Amino acid sequence: MANFLIEGENRIGGELPIHGAKNAALPILAAALLTRRSVLHNCPDLSDVRAAAHILEHLGCTVQREGDTVIVESDDGVYCDIPDGLMREMRSSVVFLGAILTRCGRARVSFPGGCELGPRPIDIHLASLERMGVNIKEDHGDLDCTIDGKMVGTELNLPFPSVGATENILLAAVLAEGTTVIHNAAREPEIQDLAGFLTAIGAKIHLKNDGTIVVEGVETLLPEVEYRVIPDRIATATYLCAAAATGGELLVTKTEPEYLAAVLPMFEEMGCQVKTGPDLIYLKGPRRLRPVRMVRTMPYPGFPTDAQAPFMALSTLAQGTSVFVENIFESRYKHAAELMRMGARIKVEGRVAVVEGVPALHSAQVRCTDLRGGAALCIAALAAAGVSRVSDIAHIERGYERLEEHLSSLGAKITRE
Ligand code: UD1
């Protein structure tokens, strides 16, 4: 695997347009199975997106990229299975399940295993699909799913507002017989974007403010669509963290400040100056960061779990103690041990991490443990004295388009090894 070499203590500043959202593009690519031709603009060029394209190609679609536009054509002969190797390329491949079921009336996919964030169960996905009339059998690690006739709309109460489960239900419900009501559905902007895409191909979806989604099944969907993926809120937060950690001044463009309503006040609490425009965020880092009293990760509109690691990197340099409570994933502090190699002082106890800020970090050899944890290590390395080697950067490439090129254009000294 490749590494980054990062020489720290260089300010991150300038202007940066943000790429499209990975977590919106992936379910929308799965949804492309439900129409013949999808033209998707602002589709980020990431290894996870390429993995989704491989799945579509395996299923019989053609996928072409022209700049940031991806064109998916899906003709009649669509297969209904995803082999184990392709499922493992990307954990969120489970979102293809609902789309394949709607398109083919059956599906065979391998059971997604655990991942670097701990066990990733899909019980909510499966229980919901079963309630909609899908027969699911586990067969040697594969899920064999069949439907007698059509899927049927029903009332579902999710025990947790799971993003992936909400997406699978939406994909299953659009052509189901009757109305599906999802109570306690996920409300992330990426869910709104998937609903936007499905609506553009003729689905009838009503997103209510209280977290209920109502989907009225329709008979057919439209054959063609052109759609623009929303900007990536987590990439936005990550670059802002890089500027904040190095005392820089950054203008992020082509983004959506509203998606970061729970995050931007944290930057202010840490002493950053923040200004927003319709699709812009400006941030100026202070000479010394202040601590953030409490970061509790929550489902949207709360503080996103995906921004926890980048903020932890930032808080290691604050003048005082910051507390993090991770409420979404069981095991999402693996970056803490790596940050400690750079001189950070962090204590982790179950879901809580206490970070005692230090005046400066020093360079070290550190290893990415997961996508956002890897981004956190880059932020720390950008601020640290000396040259750090960040290894296993394939994790980072799942979610950040040309990170080293963008950081270099903003004043970082970063090379790939
Ligand atoms: C999505 C995002 C990921 C983000 C997460 C939470 C994508 C591709 N990934 O992941 O970046 O960190 O939302 O915002 O969009 N759970 C169950 N049973 C289930 C489903 C989930 O117990 O059937 C649990 C999970 O183990 C986890 C929590 O619910 O602890 C949240 O998971 P979920 O919202 O489903 O996240 P993902 O869709 O996997």
Image: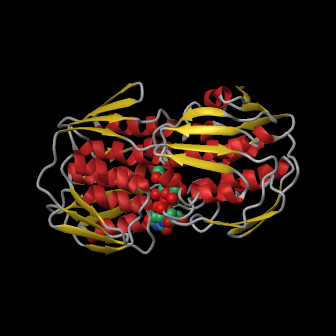
Quadrant of residue 2 within the rendered picture: top right
Depth check: give the residue in front, 147 or 74.
74
Q: Could you tell me how many numbered marks the image carries?
A: 0
How are the colours assigned in the image?
secondary structure
Q: Residue furthest left?
A: 219
Say if 281 sits above or below 44 in the image: below
Q: Is residue 169 left or right of residue 308?
A: left
Estimate the x, y position of residue 205 in percent, counting from the top left: 24, 60
Answer with left or right where residue 238 lies relative to residue 134. right
x%, y% of residue 38? 27, 36
In this picture, residue 212 sits left or right of residue 34: right
Q: Is residue 30 above or below residue 66?
A: below
Residue at image location 33% in from the left, 36% down from the top: 40
Quadrant housing the C terminus = top right
* Quadrant for the N terminus in the image: top right
Question: Looking at the image, is 249 positioned above or below residue 307?
Answer: above
Residue 139 visible here: yes
| Residue 383 coordinates in the image, percent (x, y) | 79, 41
Residue at position x 37%, y 62% in the image: 166
Q: Is residue 117 visible?
A: no
**Where in the figure is residue 332, as x and y percent of width and height?**
65, 59
Q: Is residue 276 left or right of residue 148?
A: right
Which of the 4 quarters of the picture holds residue 269?
bottom right
At horizontal 31% and vertical 70% (from top left) the residue drawn is 182
